[in-house]
Amino acid sequence: MFPGWKILSDKAAPNALLNPVDRYNPQKCDGGNCVEAIDEIMEWIEDSESPRRLLCLTGPAGSGTSVVQQAIAERCSEKDILASAFFFSSTDPSRNTLSSIVPTMALQFGKRHPTLKQSIATVITNDPAIFLKPLQTQMNTVIVDPFKYLQRQNISTFSTTLPYVILIGGLDECRGEDRRAEVLAAIGRCLLDSDLPFRIVVTSSPERTIRSALEVGGYLHQTAYHIRLNLSLDASDSIRQYLRRRFQDIGLRDGNRNWFTVDDIEALVEAASGLFVYAALVAKYVSDRRRPPPDSLRVIRNWLNTSAHDQRVALPPLDLLYANILSSAKNNYEKIHGDPHPNFLLLFRIYHLKDAIPLDWDLSLRDIKSFNRILDLEENAHEILLQDLHTLVAVKPTSDGGLRLDFCHETLSEFLDSAGRAGDLFVPRSRAYAYIAKCCVYKINQCPLESSQSSPTVLVQLSCDALRTVLNPDSVMYMNEQLVDFTQQNGWQKIDRMLSARKYATNDDYAKVLEGWIHASTTVLDRFKVSHLHIFCHIVAK
């Protein structure tokens, strides 16, 4: 161990970390403003285009700031983007002063990157008394300078692999107003003034030190994205404040602070009818850089005005927003690509059912690029389809290096699943599953019988796994001709040979696959018993 690292470890406060052994059992967020705050903070954290790198969450006792800070730390940890967390506590001597904050932060940074660990340890070895010096000196010497040094070395994986979220919780529990002001000053002058990739979240009660820094005229007023938790706010007031914050942030990003009006905010608050998800979707839609925010806002206002004056489209505002975003994207897609097969709505529904519905997909099918190959599409087909749907869908990496689609909210699934709500945009699940199954049948048919056991392609194996998942009583209703042809081309024999030749990690895995195929084949047999008795007999004979 480096001598400096031993000094650092001794100065750190283990109780201030995310999951210390002797920490109290943390509360869980059970609704209200704190749920909305968590969603807003995570959205800000993951928005690389937001111009402000500091977020301050303030609220009086009982408003939920401690619940939110714990939830944010846990979510960031799960996403592997939490660089460091430090929770102050007025009753714990190891974390109610400034003495341990920099050592604890640096300890977490170093554990995430070995070269950074060595660099931090070296500066402490060279100056063992560094933690007796002012906080800004500590932060610059132990955190900022090692980061800058490694950035100058152009270490290829440094910027891309290191987590970037710094969480400082319960600042009001640090003893002494001067000490709390010192923390804020160090953040502003060391972390924000340097070209470092951090997103910093500070939570606190609105005591005088932090309040004066954040209010109009305070030195953090323009710098910080400020969320206030208030016990007395109703849903409309929370939405109003949220939209104002998000729109101000967009204006700061684009250099146009006056791009929206009070009337715009009030119209959207009224349309939201207390639904925070509506406000979040609006903010996401107008922040899309491919359109000027004033134009996007004007489009939404026009949608609302059209609905108000035309009873034929008098949908609830959230459904209206979903319908208009999908219809607009569909029209733009068809202008460029015509009306291909699968068409826009069918393909979007297929993608939705793949990633938003908890089906028992095989792990290998969770990558959207692999799924595109089964559908006989280009690997980037999802990018083309979703280019106007970033408000509703995000492409996220999977743990095994693939890509999945992340749909915005469960209310979108409810909308897409309801013929009454989606109207002309509705695509039944059975039709989407049938299309997937037809593509799988086609891929398996292309594989020669003699190759199905010895050397089936990865694509054929994927098609076999997908077919097992989507064969159900509803989907087979659309597949009479395809299943007859599949049977006559020895499709079931090919599947049997592939299952026999496949290697399984455990007997449970094999049993699970076999059970799935028994269910799927029973479904097909039940369908053919009446409509295609001779084919039924042929299947049984095989």
Image (spheres, rainbow, N blue to C red):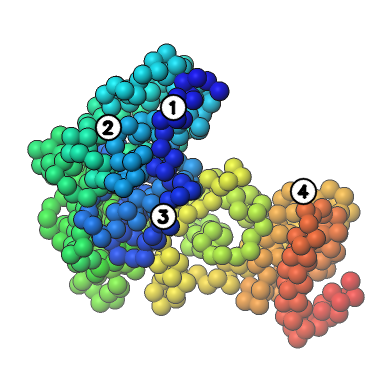
Q: Which residue is mark 4?
A: 457
Q: Which residue is mark 2?
A: 187
Residue at the spot 70% in from the left edge and 63% down from the top edge: 467
View extreme (left): residue:
217
Q: Amino acid at mark 4?
A: Thr
Circle 1 packing at 10 Å, graded few (<14), some (14-19), many (20+), is many
Q: Is residue 310 something one can see in this rendering?
A: yes
Nearer the observer, 102 or 492: 102
Residue at the spot 27% in from the left edge and 74% down from the top edge: 314
User: Which of labels 4 and 2 is toward the front?
Assistant: 2
Q: On screen, 205 above or below 216?
A: below
Q: Which residue is mark 3?
A: 24
User: Which of labels 3 and 4 is toward the front?
Assistant: 3
Circle 2 packing at 10 Å, graded few (<14), some (14-19), many (20+), is some
Q: Which residue is mark 1?
A: 8
Is 540 left or right of 274, judged from the image as shown? right
- How far apart are the alpha carbons under marks 1 and 4? 54 Å
Within the image, what quadrant is residue 342 found in?
Answer: bottom right
Nearer the observer, 378 or 113: 113
Q: Amino acid at mark 3?
A: Tyr
View extreme (top): residue:
126
Nearer the observer, 353 or 214: 214
Task: Determine the secondary structure under disc 1.
Answer: helix
Nearer the observer, 60 or 388: 60
Q: Position of residue 220 (x, y in %)?
A: 18, 37
Task: Determine the secondary structure under disc 4.
Answer: loop
Q: Position of residue 293 (x, y in %)?
A: 24, 47
Q: Position of residue 42 (x, y in %)?
A: 37, 49
Within the image, what quadrant is residue 188 found in?
Answer: top left
